[in-house]
Amino acid sequence: MEKKKLGEIGEKIAEEYLKKKGYKILEKNYIPKKIKPFFGEIDIVAQKGETIIFVEVKTTSSLIKGEEKVNFIKIKKIKKTAEFFLTERRLLDCFWQIDVISIEILKDEKRAKLYHFENILC
């Protein structure tokens, strides 16, 4: 399966998981209007209670776990993009966090395993 299609499937699984857990999806595949080299894309922007959650979704069908692909540089880009999102929407005084959802697609078993790592900046 091609990488882009695998990512789309993972993001859909993550979105449904978050909705079932009571999260409100605010935006998907957020890219700031003013693109700068240090900005990236945020897969899902959600809200639960008063907290805005910026979710990085990593989907894999290999032995490398998705969460292992989220390194310091990726976290730094997500943080900058999250701060831009909050500034753009004048949400500077709100609580926010960055989560990682790792999805392992098990082709042989026709199912997926989902791991949710909350508030990875703590």
Image (spheres, rainbow, N blue to C red):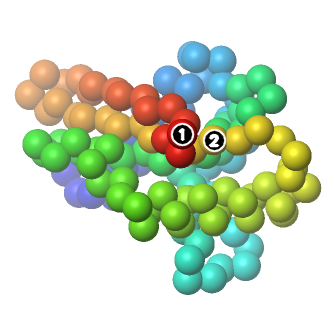
Look at the picture and state if 32 lies above or below 24: below
Label 2 sits on residue: 97
Judged by depth in the image, the label closer to the viewer, 1 or 2, is: 1
- Quadrant housing residue 54: top right
- Quadrant housing residue 36: bottom right
Look at the picture and state if 56 lies above or below 77: above
Badge 2 amino acid: Gln
Left or right side of 69 for 12? right
Element on which disc 1 rests: loop
Residue at left offset 29%, top offset 54%:
69
Residue 80 is labelled as: none
Look at the picture and state if 71 lies above or below 121: below
Whether residue 11 can be seen here: no
| Residue 118 horizontal/vertical position (percent) | 51, 32
State the separation of the CA atoms marked 1 and 2: 9 Å
| Residue 120 horizontal/vertical position (percent) | 49, 41
The reply to whether callout 1 and callout 2 are in contact (CB within 8 Å) is yes
Badge 1 amino acid: Cys
Label 1 sits on residue: 122
Residue at left offset 53%, top offset 66%:
77
Left or right side of 28 for 7? left
- Give the residue at the far bottom of this rendering: 37
Residue at left offset 27%, top offset 27%:
112
Element on which disc 2 rests: strand
| Residue 39 horizontal/vertical position (percent) | 59, 72
Looking at this view, is 70 or 34 the one in front? Answer: 70
Residue at left offset 42%, top offset 67%:
73
Choose the circle earlier in sequence order: 1 or 2.
2
Q: Residues within 10 Å of mark 2 (few under 14, many from 20)?
A: some
